[in-house]
Structure formats: structure tokens, C-alpha cells
Image: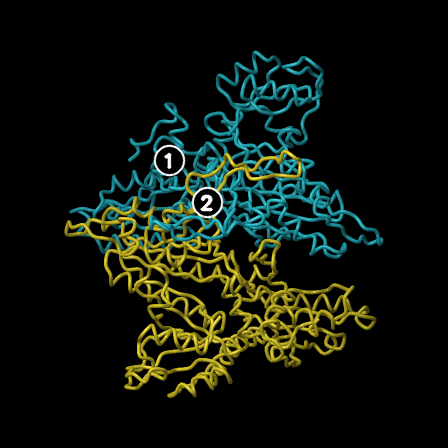
Chain colours: A cyan, B yellow
Amino acid sequence: MSKEITSRSVDFSKWYNDIVVKAGLAEHSSVRGCMVIKPYGFAIWEKMKSILDARFKATGHVNAAFPLLIPKSFLSKEAAHVEGFAKECAVVTHYRLKNAEDGSGVIVDPDAKLEEELIIRPTSETIIWNTYKNWIRSYRDLPLLINQWANVMRWEMRTRLFLRTSEFFWQEGHTAHATKQEAIDETEMILKEYANFMENYIGVPVIKGVKTESERFAGADNTYTTEGLMQDGKALQMGTSHFLGQNFAKAFDVKFQTKEGGLEHVWATSWGVSTRLMGALVMAHSDDKGLVVPPKLAPIQVVIVPILGKKMNAKLDLLQAAVDNIKGQLDGVSVKYDGDDTKRAGFKFAEYEMKGIPLRIAIGPRDLDNGTVEIARRDTQTKDTYSIDNVGDTVRQLLEEIQNSLYQKALDFRKSHTTKVDTFDEFKEVLNGKGGFVYAHWDGTAETEAAIKEATKATIRCIPLDNEQEEGVCVFSGKPSKQRVLFAKAY
Amino acid sequence: MSKEITSRSVDFSKWYNDIVVKAGLAEHSSVRGCMVIKPYGFAIWEKMKSILDARFKATGHVNAAFPLLIPKSFLSKEAAHVEGFAKECAVVTHYRLKNAEDGSGVIVDPDAKLEEELIIRPTSETIIWNTYKNWIRSYRDLPLLINQWANVMRWEMRTRLFLRTSEFFWQEGHTAHATKQEAIDETEMILKEYANFMENYIGVPVIKGVKTESERFAGADNTYTTEGLMQDGKALQMGTSHFLGQNFAKAFDVKFQTKEGGLEHVWATSWGVSTRLMGALVMAHSDDKGLVVPPKLAPIQVVIVPILGKKMNAKLDLLQAAVDNIKGQLDGVSVKYDGDDTKRAGFKFAEYEMKGIPLRIAIGPRDLDNGTVEIARRDTQTKDTYSIDNVGDTVRQLLEEIQNSLYQKALDFRKSHTTKVDTFDEFKEVLNGKGGFVYAHWDGTAETEAAIKEATKATIRCIPLDNEQEEGVCVFSGKPSKQRVLFAKAY
């Protein structure tokens, strides 16, 4: 199977698509820009969801569900928001079909035109703040800490599985607070939760920072971001957390009575991560043999493959006892036993490599005599023989090692692909060479930011939190600058 | 709070709506026909989901995600299906908005008209079978046992929260099989899983049966159903499981190579339960004081309310110790402690009654001296004093008693509201009197079924499985009949 995968060095983009499709994660559907998430991909996404959901609940949030459709006029209520989101979106104009008179099928019934068009949500700030208006009266109703897991739609012209699709799946948190500081604290707390998940579960180190004004969420006063680096040296924005100020409260007239008896607009945040994280998982760790799944997110952590055949046929009882023994030691570990005798072991090995199962345990006839098993690591593709007697401890230790090692490898890659530059020539040389993150002085203007993007396709990924302050000059304009910011080409 | 609820005896429909809104389960949104599921309602739905999802997985199914939008032409491919589903649905015709020239907001961009309109899925058979076409080649690819949790949309003219909304949430299973018998077995297995969940978790006894031809799912060869009886004597169809024959395989040309080397169309099933189950939960058990939630589905199973005030102020340490003691005994039980000193205990009691929390533990100053607590049951509204020493056992036993008692009460209600009738006068008398299920002979024709519906608004809910066979005459036509079928007015 692996020979069907395009090599990373030949065409990274094709390699990515090959893995997503051939590992059974997702595929394009017949509907332009919309994907089908296949069972194996969905199982990984379900793990991500359950871990994140537990963290949201542990930090005081509850789930709810708001409508899929948003009245067109709602989008116009927040001036910046409509500019950002109203443009490329799916518009519902009619609510009925009827049989064509010529019998050719069904056609849209012109008599069933909606008075006001409805938009399939590209994000839900407007419909949610229109709802919060009725829920918030007093400081006693605050904070309101709500999340929803939902599908959203943005009409994308160029789509890539998981990274940019018209329909995608995400969670969107929408919180309401009595004070500015509390809203900012929430925004930052969520950013930390996101970073923790990305680093300790997906195994991707991220730079936490704030976006420049031109890269902010449409309607936000400040956008915090987590930026990861993929194997091709391009950055991936993995999740964002927005401090919305009072913008949506003002747009939807949401005020609350303060403890002191005054009437004030509510402070807001919103934050989200999406199925794009699946793209990060693929691009950060996989290799030319297929997907590599971090153990903490693997639907199957260990696969047991017996070496069937003539020699084994005499020992099937011993084999069954060995499998039971192993499973008995692996409580809490997700184990699959593949005893299918219509497929060769070599074929199975390739299949499980393609799917990125962290550990493969092979049992041959001689292993049964010796009380051993052969364990192969997917990440390093190394294998060793271990005693079956303490295979439980061995597996647990190896899974932990793999999880740590994937993160460390991604961190090492980032370190070797992060460069401080002082001139625009250096800037371009790095970007066109090894790529990666580039720290450079910037004069702080949107004009320079746009000019650099125009010239190099690199964008300011963020101004890192706790960024080192130092005097310097902008690599592009030569004007004075107080800090380097993080540039990269990005997805 | 409870005095705000309309009494069941005054207006059942208004009572239902009052409970859904005032218990914080759901409300209507600004988008016609679409609801907002509020956090408390969503928490109950999440419990339903997680229990059902675990059962689906235990019976071999996996989850996936298919597109929200369906090309219009797909609906026309299965003749019966398009008649049933293409009519009232949300139609996406455009993919872009633009600023109005007069500055009044955004308008639909006429240049962004889709070549083919897209329908928001009313159900997903068509898009899924169009996908399965590429997944199924050989008998080795079968069975395919896939479920998705999704939002769907049917443009409803008259909506009721949870029971009938334009957008609703559900799971839809779509399975593919090599043989007819295997598909029928799947359909029936799922029906049993549904009935088990409805009876042992929601606490609503259901009649399992098959629909008449005119009540079948559009595109099915056979529709199995689970019918529950609500407190107003009307039936609620709680979930259906469809044997789809080879209809969708033929419509989408899905064939597989058999073990013997032949080429055959695949056999199919589909099955679903929706947020309608929330409506069943409300209507089956609640009373004029509010919601009653069965313990197994209660997000909060026990609420502890201290009787605060002057006498308690001297004993706050003892109170804390008592609360810790209780919580320590309630591992695995969902407990909330409400120590809010800005609200009176009586106000809290009413609030938790409204929300249907199964058990309330009150602790007064004297209880602290006596080593006791007062435990009130929501379902029977009885209360008793118990020793704090074994409050864990007491609570567990009471929760089990409540769960069983709710089911038993619903079963008793159904027994007393199930009537065998032999004449059409009796039939009408029962339906216009106490209502409920009516077993009557029917001649088996769609004409008679329609005439009875026209005359009485009652429909055939199902032909029960393992129905008793007996000679008789149709209550309407007088023609011969071999069995009684189940009639009722229904939601």
C-alpha cells in the first residue's frame, strides 16, 4: 500500500491528500467543497472532542445548540463582522420543491420564496447574541459560559480535506461577562487550554500570541492564536480565542444591571477549534509510509497480528492463550486483534502502518515457544523482542515514549526551522529556503504587513505573548521597531 | 414558579410548552421553526446520546459524517423517496452576498447562483448511498454499519418544541448488507435496542410493530416503529427502523461481487431517533409542578439544599462536614450542592422541582444535631427523614425506585388507556373520551385506513409484532379481518 503514497519530498500537498484518503480519514463528497469524514477519521475526531469537551466542562462551560440558519439581516448588525463573514456563504432562498411539469424531476417552487433569506452559519456570534439578549438581565445572569459543537459553512473556492472545506465541524464557545478583565481572562484561559491540548495530545508545539489588527477575527477587539509548524515549514493556525469587547453586545443591544444598579453592555468572548486539527495531526507527524497517530488520540493503540500458516496451525490453542494473556495485561489500552486468515501478515503490517497504529505486536510460532512477542513502533519503525510476561508494562511505557517522542521531534523540527533575521534579503532567503518561522522586526503598520505579504506570501502569524522587547528596525521599511514578530507562510 | 405552569387538565399543549420553556430545556429562536436547545435540555440530550452511542458501538456500528447539503437531483433518484422528502425543505440557491448599493445592508449576489440547487438534508439516504457506491465492491466490504449524529431540516408549517421543529437533531444509522435476511435482522435488532432505551432509560413503555404501507418511510419496504403513549392519551412515534430492500442500491447503482462471483444489489437499512425523545420524556412523566426527569437521564440526580439562616450560622462547620460526608458516600451519583445564600430554601425547592431533579436532600440545623437529612422524591413528592450514616445506600435505592416507579406508572397508564373495541361507535367513543390506544379490526386496505383517519383523526400506529391472530370484521367496512391493529390519535 505504502508505494501508492506520494513522497513528502516530491509533493507535500499530494502526500497529505494521499494519507488522508488512503488511511481512511476523509474524502471529497459529490457536493462541492464538502467532505465525508470516514469512520476511522471520525473516531480520531471523537477522541479530540471528548478530551476537549471534558476540559471545557471542567472549566465551567456547558453545551447548548443554536440554529443552523441565520437571518441575513443579523449579519449586518456588526459592521466588521459582516465584512468578514457575509461574503462567501450558502444562502437559503426557498423552502419548497415541486415536480417539474415535464416530469424531469423536481424544481424549486417559485411560490415558496422566503421573505428574508437565511444564511447557513459561517460562525454563530450573531444568532447567539440575539438569543443572549433575552437571557441576560442582571449581573446575576453572568458569566454565561456556553459552547456548542456544530457544523458551519463558508463557501471556499479552493478546498483541501480538513484544512479548508466549505462545511466543517468545530466547537464554538460564546461567553458573556460583567467586566472587561473577566472576558480577557476567559479568552486567555481558553488559549492555554487549547495550547495544552495541541501540545500534550496532538503532540504539536504551538506559539501563543495575538494577531495583528488586519488578521483579527471580524468583530473582535483582540484575537489570540496558537500557531503550529508543519513538516513543510508552513505555519498552521490551529485555534483562536477572541476578546470581542462590547461589539456584539452593542450590535444586539445586550445590557445588564450591575450590582451597583447601573446598566452596562456585556463583555464577550468567542473561541473555536475545528476539524482542521485533524490536518495538523496528519501534517505534523506522518511519513512516507502513512499516517502516524499520537497514542493519546489513537482509536486503536495496539494491534496484535499473529503470523498464521502451517507452523502456527499446530499451536492455535497456545496462540489464543497468548492473545488472552496480552489482552489481560492491557486493561485501559485500546487493542485490536486481527486474526483474519484471508490476509497475509505482511499485508496487514502495511495496512496498520498506513493507519498509524502506534504499536504492532506480532506473534510467530517461535514466539509461542519462547514466551516472547515482537513489538514494532510506528513512529520510529523499530522493532524488538520482549517477554510476554510483562508486555502490559512494556506497552504502556512504549506508548508514553511515543507520545513524548512525537512532541519532541516536532519541537526539534520547529527549533531548527525558526530563524531570527535582520534584513529583508535574509527574510526572503529563509522563506524560500528551509521555510519555517521567521522572527523579524516590523514597524507595526498594516501597510508594511501587506507589502511583505505581497512580496513574499508570508504573513504575521502572531505577536507572541511575553515577547522579548528589543530596539531594532523593520526589515522592510527600516523604520524603528520595538520587537520582532513571528512571520511564516501559512495554510 | 410552579404557579406559572398551566395545568395539564386545563390545556395539555400549553402545559407542555410551559415546562419545556420554564425548566430551561429549549425555546423558539428568531428563525422560524428552529429551536434553541438550552444548556439544561442539552445536558439531558447528551446523556441520551452517550447511552445510545455506546449501544450502537457495542453492536458493531461506527460513526462518520456526511455532507449537510444534498444536490437536488439526488432526491429524484428514488421515486418514493422524492415524494416523501423533496417537498418541504430548505433550498440553497446562491453562495454569495454583497453590499447593497444603497448601503442598506447585504443582498444576495445574483451572479452567485448555483448551477444546481442544494437541499439541506431532510434525511441522508441519498447522499450516503451515493457515497457507498464507491465504498462497496465485494462481499468483503459488507456489512457496512455506519451511524451519524447530525442536524437535519424539514420545513414544518406548525412547529412544537422538540416534537416537530424545522431543524432537529438525531442519529441516523445507514447499513449495507449482502443478504435480505441480514438486513432484516439488523432492522429488528435496532428496534429492540430502541425499545430497551425507551423503556429502561426514558421510562416509557413502547409497542413495537410495523407501519402500514401508507405510513411507511418514503423509500422503505418495511418500517418498524416504537409507539409510546403520552399522558393526554395521544401516541408518540418515538423511533423507527427501516428495511429499505434494494431500493437505494438500485437508485444509486450499488452492486457487490458475491462470494460465488455474481454481482448483486446491496440490501439496506436506515434507522433514527431524534430530539423528539426529549418531548417523550417531558410528556410521559412530568406534572403540574414541572419536569420529572428519570434518574438514569438526569444531569443532576441529587441536589443538596441547606436551610440557611441564623440558627445555621453557628453550625457552618458542621454543615460543611455533613455535606462532605454525603458527597463522600455518593461516588458515581451526580450531586449538586446549592449553598447560595441570596436565595431562600423554598425558592430553591420550587426551582429544583421545576427542573425535575429526582432527589432533594435538605439539611436543617436540627438535622445536624440528629445526624439526619430530609430526602424528598420529585416523582411522588413525598419526603422522609433518614440517617446521614447510610445516606449513600438510601439515595441509590431511592433513585432505582424512582426509575422503576416512573416506568410502572407509565405502564399502568397505558394499560388503563388501551381498549379493544368491536364497533365503530365504540371506536369513536373511546377516542373522544379517555383516548389512548385502541385495538380494532381493520380490513387491511389503505382506503379504510384513510377513511377512519378522515372521520376520527386516528391513525394506525402499527401492526404490533407477534400480534394475536383472530377472525373478526373491520370496525369501519365490516369486511373480514384476521387481526386487530393499533389505532390512536398521535403527535
**Position of residue B69 measured from the top left corner of the image (x, y, whole percent):** 44, 46
Residue behind mark 1 = A19
Q: Residue at x 44, y 45 (%)?
A: B118
**A378 versus A134 height, above or below:** above
State which chain disc 1 sits on: A
| Circle nearer the viewer, 2 or 1 | 1
Q: Considering depth in this image, is A206 or B477 the residue closer to the camera? A: B477
Q: Considering depth in this image, is A75 or A53 the residue closer to the camera? A: A75
The kind of residue tagged 2 is: Leu
Numbered label attached to residue A297? 2
User: How many circles with numbers are drawn on the protein?
Assistant: 2
Q: Is residue B191 left or right of residue A441?
A: left
Check if mark 2's residue and mark 1's residue have beta carbons within 8 Å. Answer: no
**Position of residue A181 measured from the top left corner of the image (x, y, whole percent):** 75, 42
State which chain disc 2 sits on: A
Q: Is residue A290 left or right of residue A281?
A: left
| Label 1 Cα neighbours within 10 Å, binned few <14 / some 14-19 / many ≥20 | many
Of label 2 and label 1, which has the lower sequence position?
1
Residue A372, can we see it? no
Residue A223, can we see it? yes
**Position of residue A258 measured from the top left corner of the image (x, y, whole percent):** 80, 52
Q: Secondary structure beneath disc 2?
A: helix
